[in-house]
Amino acid sequence: MTQVIPHYPMGDAQPNRTPWWTYFTFSTDHKVIGIQYLVTTFVFYLIGGALAAIIRTELATPDSDLMPPEWYNGMFTMHGTVMIFLWIVPSVTGGFGNYLVPLMIGARDMAFPFLNALAFWMIVPGATLLMGSFFVGPASTGWTAYPPLSILTEQHAGQIMWIFSLLIIGTSSILAAVNFVVTIWSMRMPGMGLFDMPLFCWATLAAAIMVLTSTPVLAGALILLSFDLMGGTNFFNPTGGGDPVVYQHLFWFYSHPAVYVMILPVFGIVSEVLPPHARKPIFGYKAIAYSSMMICALGLFVWAHHMFTSGTPDWLRIFFMVATLLVAVPTGIKVFSWMATLWGGKLRLESPLLFAVGFISMFVVGGLSGVMLGSAPIDIHVHDTYFVVGHFHYVLFGGSVFGIYAGLYHWFPKMTGRMFNEFWGKVHFVLTFVGFNLCFLPMHILGLMGMPRRVAQYDPQFTTINQICTFGAFLLAISTIPFLVNAVYSWLWGEAAPNNPWQALTLEWTTTSPPHPHNWEGDPVLETGPYDYGKDYSQSSLVRH
Amino acid sequence: MATETMTTTMHGAIAPTEPGHHPDLRLFGLIVFLMSEGMLFVGLFAAYLTFRAVATEWPPEGTPELELLLPGVNTVILMSSSFVIHQADEAIKENKLAAVRGWFLATFVMGAIFIAGQVYEYAHLEFGLTSHLFGSTFYILTGFHGLHVLIGLTLIAAVLGRSLKPGHYRAESHFGIAAASIYWHFVDIIWIVLFVLLYLL
Ligand code: HEM
Ligand SMILES: [Cu+2]
């Protein structure tokens, strides 16, 4: 089959109409807000990464010799909290979602621009509280803050600040999710049905529904926890007649869906990146769209797979085990659709596609260890060991972070109006891929050998493997440097980007790079489906002149 | 290269919307938000039911039965107020602003009576927030709901204030009135579930 790529005019880069200081204001432009989210969350990624480097340095030796174990507890608590609540969740929803959704559906902005800006700026007090808790003794009970530990903790003030910070950030993500649902549902341009939407919009819709359903339940848990800490109640304190397992249920009712909030938009990113870089239509558009909704529905009923060892009765374990394994079905549908999209394509093996393919391979590893953990008989043995740490870093780093990088490279020309340097992009990819696997693959072995997670000291028999992990972590830290330098340099002085450097078909590529303040100078025009690659336009009236 | 010309479009579709001009989606947004907020109560209700199911004795020995008369009357008042505020929603469709004010004022008074009744009940209960798990859940659930009633009252007062501005609410445009009454219905529905769980079950 001959592939006729529709001809798109390329021209000089447009002048950037958004002066730099706009990014420090209460702007209601979804593109400004999107970039505000992306940059802010990346700063938190660096902070969380620095904490990770410290953690891994401590773990380079079996003894707790770099810092006292109590500090270590604070470090991994802050690391997890920052990475989840200030980096991945706001980056993939607030960052990519805000920037892309209106452009992809041909809208001028989000449905509620003011609310949008408000949601972003709520991150500032939320993050300040969390960072501030460092100075009063940070929360040190893990990102899960299980009672009774969290209500008996010495670091009272830090734990309270942690709770309030999460309440604020949670409210911010609820407000953002309201905006996504209403925008995607009601602001599509005339002629664009739900099934003409790019898959990223489907994914964002599914993620937003999960945020709306589950985040308030976390808020409920945190409010009860704060009363236990400050109000003298005993909801979760067994000595006062309370029940700590109720906290676990409420917490995971949020936090399991939260892992899909962190991965669904990334599924969307990958579904956008693969077709233009493989020059093929997406395989199984409807299957991918429906599977996002299926994950959204099923994902709400699997939370207790985090609680197989919490005295959960057998019949419940079986229910949650079966439900958990069922989620692998829609997830597998996606993975096979992506592979079929790549199959036989004219691959443009540059940074966006490299990271997208890296995402698929790493995510599959994490998905497989997930299925292992989802089987209660196995989980009972490896729960709270490094096997779990290995699992969730494969899905969160190998999955979400690789996908975010794929998206950043893919849309960098659109967002900044400039091209990034491809050579340093490849260097970044290779370093990240190697560092990542060195750091996290051995953790599975550690877990199977029985090394518990969240400890500053360990049995000397684990030393060698831990040192490999630490070496990989340092490589990962270094790998960020080429990205940062490349991004900053290219944003300022990179080669001017054409409107549509990838000859992609989704609507955001039909406007200038960077887009006009109102997204399109004239009106957006829907001429093709989002993935109609390789269709022979010369024979049809759809050809552009 | 601002514009590209093309012979045809896929659906012949061109977006007619100008920046900032789209149908009013605020009610849709509010409903989505309230559905989410409802989940907060669902979470708290689930916690309550679990505490109760796990406890050996509920309520703990020596806790007097909850008095039903006052909260029962309160429930009737709150439920009727939902019908009252609905009249305002209907009245504005016929541009009857004076009627709207009347209905809103009546709702406000009913809500205030509800809160007063709850304060009275709190003052006369024999257990406090920290007495036992039963007391803690009781005060958290009713207190949280009460907070929502107060927010509802604030919204109603705000609408009453704005309605003094001539032409602010019209048959074609009355988001504030619709929003306040939807919110009020929400508070009402939550109360009914809460009443059944706490007092009747
Ligand atoms: C095929 C899909 C998946 C399955 C079956 C699965 C299953 C599980 C199970 C059973 C656990 C609990 C292990 C334990 O504590 O003993 C777990 C932990 C975890 N998973 Fe997954 N998972 C899947 C995908 C994901 C994804 C996509 C993410 C995030 C993007 C994720 C993030 C996490 C995290 C963060 C934890 C650890 C939570 C903690 O205890 O701190 N998982 N997973
Ligand atoms: Cu889970």
Image: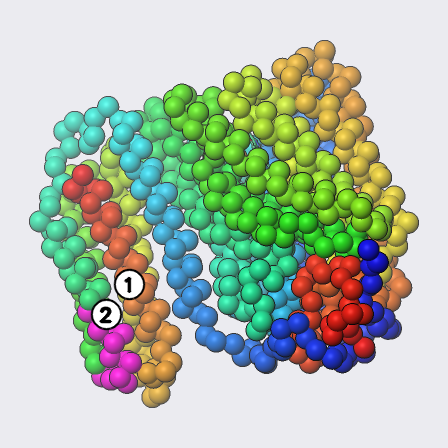
Give the overall secondary structure of the magenta segment.
helix
Q: Determine the residue positioned at 88% across, 54% down.
A: A421
In which quarter of the view is residue B147 placed? Answer: bottom left
Q: How many marks?
A: 2
Nearer the observer, B196 or A542:
A542
Nearer the observer, A529 or A494:
A529
Q: How is the image coloured?
A: rainbow
User: Residue A415's x, y, as percent?
Assistant: 74, 63
Instruction: Tell me the quarter of the image containing the N terminus of chain A.
Output: bottom right
Q: What secondary structure is marked by label 2?
A: helix
Q: Tell me if residue A68 comes above or below residue A210 in the rendering.
A: above
In which quarter of the view is residue B80 placed? Answer: bottom left
Name the chain letter of the residue that bears numbered label 2. B
Going by the numbered disc 2, the residue's amino acid type is Ile
Q: Tell me if residue B81 comes above or below residue A334 in the rendering.
A: below
Left or right of B176? Residue A386 is right
Crowd around label 2: few <14 · some 14–19 · many ≥20 (10 Å): many
Marks 2 and 1 share the same chain: yes
State which image quarter holds ligand 1. top right
Q: What secondary structure is marked by label 1?
A: helix
Nearer the observer, A523 or B161:
A523
User: Residue A374's x, y, as percent?
Assistant: 54, 27
User: Residue B153's x, y, as percent?
Assistant: 28, 65
* Image disc number at residue B11: none
Residue where numbered disc 2 is placed: B85
Name the chain letter of the residue that bears numbered label 1. B
Residue where numbered disc 1 is placed: B184
The answer to whether mark 2 and mark 1 are in CB contact below 8 A is yes
Q: Determine the residue positioned at 51% across, 45% down.
A: A294
Q: Is residue B35 visible?
A: yes
Q: Which residues are magenta?
A: B84-98
In which quarter of the view is residue A333 placed? Answer: top right
